[in-house]
Amino acid sequence: MSMVAIESMASLSTDVFYDILRRLDGPSLAAAACACATFCSISREERLWENVCSSMWPSTNREDVKSLISLIGGFRKFYADCFPLIVNKEVTEYQWNGYLENPEEWTEAEYYGDTVELESISPLDFVSIVDIRYKDKTICSKVLWGIPNANGSNSWFHNCPFRIDLLNYAARDDDSESEVTLSVSDGLPPITSMEKERKDGKLWKELRDGLRLSWIVVNRKVKQAANLASWSPLGGQRHWPTDKDFMIRFGSVLPAKDILPCQVVECILIMKFRVMNTEGEGVETTLKLTELSMQLEDMEGAHVNGRNSLLILKEALSCRRSKNYSEVLESCHLYSKVQSELKEEKMRNESRIDRLCILSGIAAFVTFWYYIL
């Protein structure tokens, strides 16, 4: 009887522990797994991590996405791959000096990509899982299978600038309404006039502080995944290109070693909202999501073509990551700083060349008239 009682207590304890652990978020669940052998054993349950992923990324509730995650190793592995964000601190000054001085060392074949390696990468292997939150409330969840306009190994996609416009393509396979809006009921401050908004910028501050973006890229073939977003905004522009538009930028710094001369590139994720109505007392402010896109740019601001983008995305799936989001933002700001220094250096070089040309022209003009007269 005593043995039966002990077994019953052990079974009850496990059920209680499971009920406790299923209420935790990802970091807390991972920490609890290190507390004792019982918690470690229970924390291996896929159902726990499925709940965590579902709470963190509502897109993972879809049956097709669940099947995809099971294919690449399960929800526990998916969370471990996608919760830490990409960190790249290889943006060092000496690398860029070398890049500026020796760009001619790269052959055309090296610059435009390795054709042999490219053949093993199919655009159909990539899946984008995207979630947007505003003040901890999910306002948009999209899934895009494959990369649009990338059919065929010799298509124009490989030589044209790489870009994914998620709203245009994901809506075709999405059963929910494609239009995404934010209103006062979601926590937006009311706007009586755009003139007032231009002065105090209250709406802009709310958007910048409240929006969060997760853009997960999965490669079904290599069974790897990574989050390419910075979670928090890196910057943006108010009233661009019109008074009623807001552009917010997210992104990450991705490795491009042996793919491009610059060694690293920036993954730029653009989110644009437009104010739909702002006039009249009692009229609620409504913002409509008009763009959600991804593109890759090198250090000089040039768009990376489709061929090299596929190679870079594949490389990004296995690069270094960090759970410290401030470290991620620091990495992105370091990239922006080095990029600004590069642009300034190019402007100084071009200015010196212009002055040299002017002086050479003056010298030639004076010499010509000296011999004529």
Image (spheres, rainbow, N blue to C red):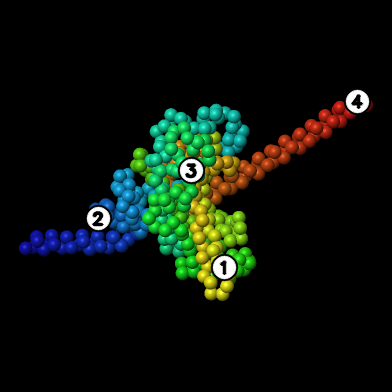
The residue under label 3 is which amino acid type? Leu
Q: Is residue 314 above or below residue 192?
A: above
Q: Residue furthest left?
A: 1
**Badge 2 element:** helix
Expressed as whole percent of the image width and height from the top left, the position of residue 185 reads 46, 69
Element type at marker 1?
A: loop
Instruction: Give percent across and percent down for residue 165.
Output: 48, 48
The C terminus sits in image quarter: top right
Which residue is depicted at the point 86% across and 28% down? 367
Of pointers 4 and 3, the one earlier in the residue sequence = 3
| Dot 1 alpha-carbon crowd within 10 angstroms: few under 14, some 14 to 19, many 20 or more | some
Q: Is residue 18 left or right of residue 327?
A: left
Circle number at residue 254 = 3
Q: Is residue 115 visible?
A: yes
Point out the frontmost of discs 2 and 4.
4
Cα–Cα span, label 4 and label 3: 60 Å
Binning the other alpha carbons within 10 Å of mark 3 as few (below 14), some (14 to 19) or many (20 upward) gives many
Question: In the rendered structure, which amino acid carries the disc numbered 4?
Answer: Ile
Secondary structure beneath dot 4 equals helix
Q: Which residue is mark 4?
A: 372
In this rendering, the label closer to the viewer, 1 or 2 = 1
Label 3, label 1: how far apart the Cα atoms are = 39 Å
- Classify 111 as above or below 3: above
Q: Nearer the viewer, residue 29 or 74?
A: 74
Can you identify the residue that label 2 sits on?
42
Q: Which mark is residue 278?
A: 1
Amino acid found under the numbered disc labelled 1? Thr
Q: Amino acid at mark 2?
A: Ile
Residue 93's disc number? none
